Amino acid sequence: MKPLRDTALLFQREFIHALRNPTWLIVGLMTPLLYLALYTPLLQKLAGGPGFPTTHVLDVFLPGMLAYLAFMNGVSEGYQTIFNLKDGQIERFRVTPANRVALLISPVLADIAWMFIFIIILVAVAVPFGFDAHITGLLVSLILLALLVMVTGAFSIAIALINKEIGSFAAIVNGISLPVMLLSGVLLPLSMAPVWMRVVAHFNPLYYVVEANRVLAAGNIWNSSVGLAFLVTLGLMVVTFWWTTRVFRKAVA
Amino acid sequence: MSIVSAKMLTKVYAGKIRAVDNLDLEIEAGQIFGFLGPNGAGKTTTLRMLATLIPIDSGEATVAGQDVRRQPAKVRRHIGYVGQFGGADPLATGREDLILQGRLNGMSASDVKKRTEELIDVLDLREFANRKGSTYSGGQRRRLEVALGIMHRPEVLFLDEPTTGLDPQNRANLWVQIRKLRDAGTTIFLTTHYLEEADALSDELAIIDHGKIVAQGTSRELKQQIAGDSVLFSFKNNGEILDKAIQLFKEQSYVREAAIEGEHVRLYVQDGAEVLPELLRLLDKEKITVKTIALSEPTLDDVFLRKTGRSLRDTGPNGKENGESK
């Protein structure tokens, strides 16, 4: 199977690249660790209160944090795309007979692999501080987050291919990321928010993933919000992949 | 039978800029074909259409017998491409990069291994083949990129401005490599805005301007069309003197053409050395004092000037080609 072989070849290359650029790895891991270390303590007084039904805030905050990590991982994908446009690598591969979907998807897959490693580290760090880990819930959560990276990664690559410049790309990505994060309930559950914010949040895909991830972290798999999150993410995946493939075929001048 | 053929090839940007305009092209197999023109002339855009990188707006093209519009995937099996930005991976070693390129082109593992070693020798990469791409000098990087382009032994190799940014020594070195490839049977289609490069390297060349081919043939054939030498004058106390001088020159039967070029007057004559004393006598009689004289045999720039009314040298090396500024 040529598409699979091409994907495997390119995945391997992308995965190893991360190791050769350790700054990226260190920063990527430090950000969520800093949130855990410096933000969770701020939530302690809310434990048991509204939005924090459990006794331990980590059980609410960490799953949300992981969803945000996945979101940011995917959204940052386009930076690499722009570098590879500039150094000619995208052109170079497009002239080879390599499978087009493989070219597009392999950096996203490598990102997902690294994200899994990060998540395992983060959970391992959080458990001694009171995080209650449920293995099956966590495994389903990894699948959901992988799908989220696919959606945001494909979206980010398309934006990068259209803009071609780091400056305008970064402006768009930052412009989108902030409201998406604030309206997802990552930092504080939206059950604490006024009604209008909760209404707006329902138009935010990340909100569904954050909600589902909290349910999954508690060990509940057969739950309507989990199903809803999968539905929203898969739907978006179909749309973004259709769009990104089109952009990739046409817009790369 | 042409290995690259284009008929009425057209690319329109932004609905109106005709980057490539009804261009016809036939390239015989086994030669170095040079595509010479100023920046923005449509060289890169043509090359990228033929290499399946951007869609053809109208017209037809075949490369290695395959239809570029309908069968781009088949075309890709027969071509190599080295773009202006190269495409070497800064984070991979040269050897790793070659291996990946071979595998993506569907070569077997054993063939990839053999070919990698072969290219490391041919393009003289041994010394740095196990270092990361980011550590390479400009010339080293270019050599690796050419190796990547020919890894799968393509019939046609597209080189877009291959020597831009290289120092003279590396440029000469790359010319040698390109000729070697041609001698081994690869057809090479290269774009350049360097007159010397087009002149020295191409077996056949086309001059392109505003998306159209204005002249095509061997370098010798093109220069013969000019048939004659050019004499370039500049004078003390310019201004009206230029008009006066040009009037004077035009009255002489042996002057084929005379035109003002900035501060200079350029003449085309059959034999420059023979008529020069006569020209000087004429100017002396009219009390026009000559500041500088340059006599030269025709160059490709003269061909370009004749066909377009502009000099290639004046168009400057730093503009952006239509194709990439889009």
Image (cartoon, grey):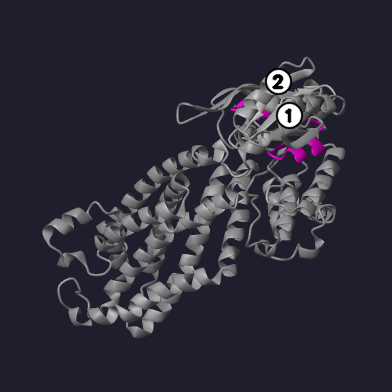
SS under mark 2? helix
- Where is residue B157 shown, x and y percent of the image? 74, 39
Which stretch appears magenta?
A: B190-213
SS under mark 1? helix
Q: From this view, report whether residue B80 is shown above or below residue A66.
A: above
Q: Does residue B63 appear to the left or right of B20 in the view shown?
A: right
- The disc placed on residue B302 is 1
Q: Which chain's residue wears label 1?
A: B
Q: Is residue B211 magenta?
A: yes
Q: From this view, report whether residue A192 is shown above or below residue B21.
A: below
Between discs 1 and 2, the one toward the N terminus: 2
Mark 1 Cα within 10 Å, few/some/many (few <14, many 20+)? many
- Hey, what amino acid is under mark 2? Leu
Q: Which residue is mark 2?
A: B248
Could you tell me if the residues under marks 1 and 2 are in contact, i.e. CB atoms within 8 Å? Answer: no
- Where is residue B92 shown, x and y percent of the image? 66, 61
Give the camera-side residue of A161 and A152. A161
- Where is residue A71 shown, x and y percent of the image? 37, 60
